Amino acid sequence: MSTLSISRPSIPMPRTSPAPDVDARFDALVRTAAPAPRTGTDFETVFDLDYGQPADAAAPVVRAVRVTKRVRPAAVQPRPVPRTVRLTRRGRLVALLAFVGIALALMTVFGGWATASLTGGTPEPVRVIEVAPGDTLYDIAADLAQPGQIRTMVHRIQELNSLPGGQITEGQKLAVPRG
């Protein structure tokens, strides 16, 4: 039988102590391996794996060696590795809900400053005019505005009267800036 066909030795060998005699280990492996089926020529006689020793010689006794773990002195202990913060799915959800809750609380507290009221600001002095037949918003603004400020006056008249566009009708009363 060839040693190349043996995957593991049947006798456990210790890993820590080297074997003093390599030939003795080899002979022990050859004798303890399962015999191959005989087919014509004897394999052992062709390669002479026994090295001329008798087949009934006892296998060498191998004793297991106990390995003890070395203990480090207390002064040389390694530093603990700092852990990183890892959020789970539930942790991310809690963080998101906390952020939304804080944002809503801040908007509630400071949101009152952003509201518009009808009483806020100083009222602009105005006078009321009635739209005559054939008048347009631009004609009225041109009569009231300084030269080159007609568009600005049209915009002010629209804001004062809450007009959606430049359409006015005959007989309509408009508030225009005094001045």
Image: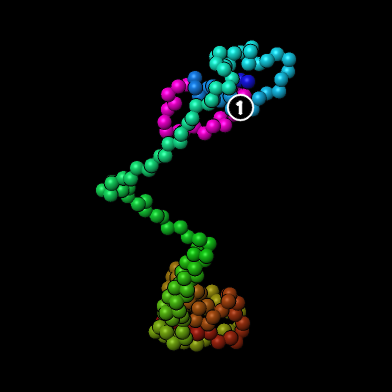
Residue 121: percent from the left, percent from the top? 40, 83
Can residue 171 be seen? Answer: yes
What residue is rendered at 54% in x and 25% in y? 58
Q: Element type at marker 1? A: loop
What residue is rendered at 47% in x and 73% in y? 101
Badge 1: few (under 14), some or many (20 or more) residues near its Cα, within 10 Å?
A: some
What residue is rendered at 42% in x and 39% in y? 66
Q: Is residue 58 above or below residue 142?
A: above
- Quarter holding residue 149: bottom left
Q: Is residue 2 above or below residue 165?
A: above
Residue 136: percent from the left, percent from the top? 57, 77
Residue type, mark 1 in image: Ala
Q: How is the image coloured?
A: rainbow
Classify the position of the C terminus by image quarter. Answer: bottom left
**Residue under label 1:** 33
Classify the position of the N terminus by image quarter. Answer: top right
Residue most extreme to the right: 40
- Quarter holding residue 47: top right
Is residue 11 a member of the stretch shown in magenta?
A: yes
In terms of secondary structure, what is the magenta stretch mainly? loop
Is residue 136 a member of the stretch shown in magenta?
A: no
Depth check: 123 or 131 in front? 123
Depth check: 18 or 127 in front? 18
Magenta span:
3-22
Residue 86: percent from the left, percent from the top? 46, 57
What residue is rendered at 58% in x and 76% in y? 164
Can residue 151 be seen? Answer: no
